[in-house]
Amino acid sequence: MKRRDFITMLGGAAAAWPFTAQAQPPDRNRVRRIGVLTYSSENDPEGQAYIAAFREGLQGLGWTEGGNIRIDIRWTSGEVGPMQTFAKELVGLQPDVFLAISTPAVKAAQHETRTVPIVFTQVTDPVAQGLVESLERPGGNITGITIFEPEIGGKWLQVLKEIAPTTARAAVIFNPSTAPYYRLYMRSIEAAAVALGVKVLEVPVHSRAEIETAIAMLAREPGGGVIAMSDLFPVVHRDLIIALTARYRLPAVYFLRSLVTDGGLISYGVDLNDMQRRAATFVDRILKLAKPADLPVELPTKFELVINQTTAKTLGLDIPLTLLTRADEVIE
């Protein structure tokens, strides 16, 4: 081969290399996989609303299911046992990022992987639970949005006393297995109890039978009230708690709007749909190669007070005007 022909051929090959590289689809165009583990049941409207809010948040950031992302969801219906199995199954699908909704869900995910990025929501005090090193610098493969606001426990008791002034004893219902963080809420509840002159009772429950026993015992004396702690257990068994408090004519305060729309008296808590939409921002940044260790854990920013006026009338309660004017929603 003549030297001139060789140089011409070499130059042509060099010119072709960039086009060969450009012909490869960029990595950012591949379909990304998101694993979601949630405590809700698939037929729970509230659980479906959380997922819808998450999808809405993703879509607003340019991620479309069936387009550039795939979402694999596992519903656990409030049972802690299946969470580990489902977490293992989801990690086996090799997701790009994992969304864990609730404390048991993120702990199950953490047990299965220390490399797949995990975004959590509806988790109380992730530092105390060993999920992150600090809120500012999570330090591992986990970050997200905490549901915990230190003073909210006291506010539950305050609104309970405000809507039912004769409340003298408040039973705080929770499951220690799903709410190992319960003492974090009890501190502010107990502080408010002193100021309000209310006796607070810690009532750990593990089953529907124990819920029935606890509420029946509370109703034996007048002046009883119920606080359903921020815990997935009261959510799963809300039908029973709402039915029993109605039967025994006990005022009860909840932490989720859905428990009031289902017939509960009053709720004050974090807007969880807003939290799920915000979680999409974490997922978006991680899919764009941000590291969870560098993404600070965020605090709740949006709270809502919801009152069921029909339930109040059934219980013979007159809702104070000051409470009505502060409510974000009044259900009639």
Image (spheres, helix red, strand yellow):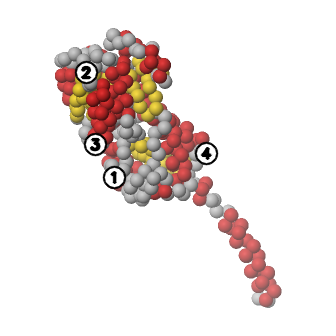
Return the residue at label 3: 180
Q: Are marks 1 and 2 in contact (CB under 8 Å)?
A: no
Q: How many marks?
A: 4
Estimate the spatial distance between the alpha carbons at disc 2 and disc 3, rounded to whole Å. 26 Å
The tag earlier along the polypeptide, 3 or 1, is 1
Please identify, in this view, whether the residue under mark 4 or under mark 1 is nearer the observer: 1
Q: Residue at x 19, y 17 (%)?
A: 221
Compared to residue 306, the image places residue 60 above or below, namely below
Q: Amino acid at mark 1?
A: Gly
Question: Quick one: 113 or 196, which is closer to the camera?
Answer: 196
The tag earlier along the polypeptide, 1 or 2, is 1
Please identify, in this view, whether the residue under mark 2 or under mark 3 is nearer the observer: 2
Return the residue at label 4: 62
Estimate the spatial distance between the alpha carbons at disc 2 and disc 4, rounded to whole Å. 52 Å
Q: Are marks 4 and 1 in contact (CB under 8 Å)?
A: no
Question: Quick one: 263 or 229, which is closer to the camera?
Answer: 229
Return the residue at label 1: 130
Q: Amino acid at mark 2?
A: Ala
Q: Is residue 134 left or right of residue 65?
A: left
Q: Quadrant of the N terminus?
A: bottom right
Return the residue at label 2: 168
Compared to residue 187, the image places residue 131 above or below, namely below
Please identify, in this view, whether the residue under mark 1 or under mark 2 is nearer the observer: 2
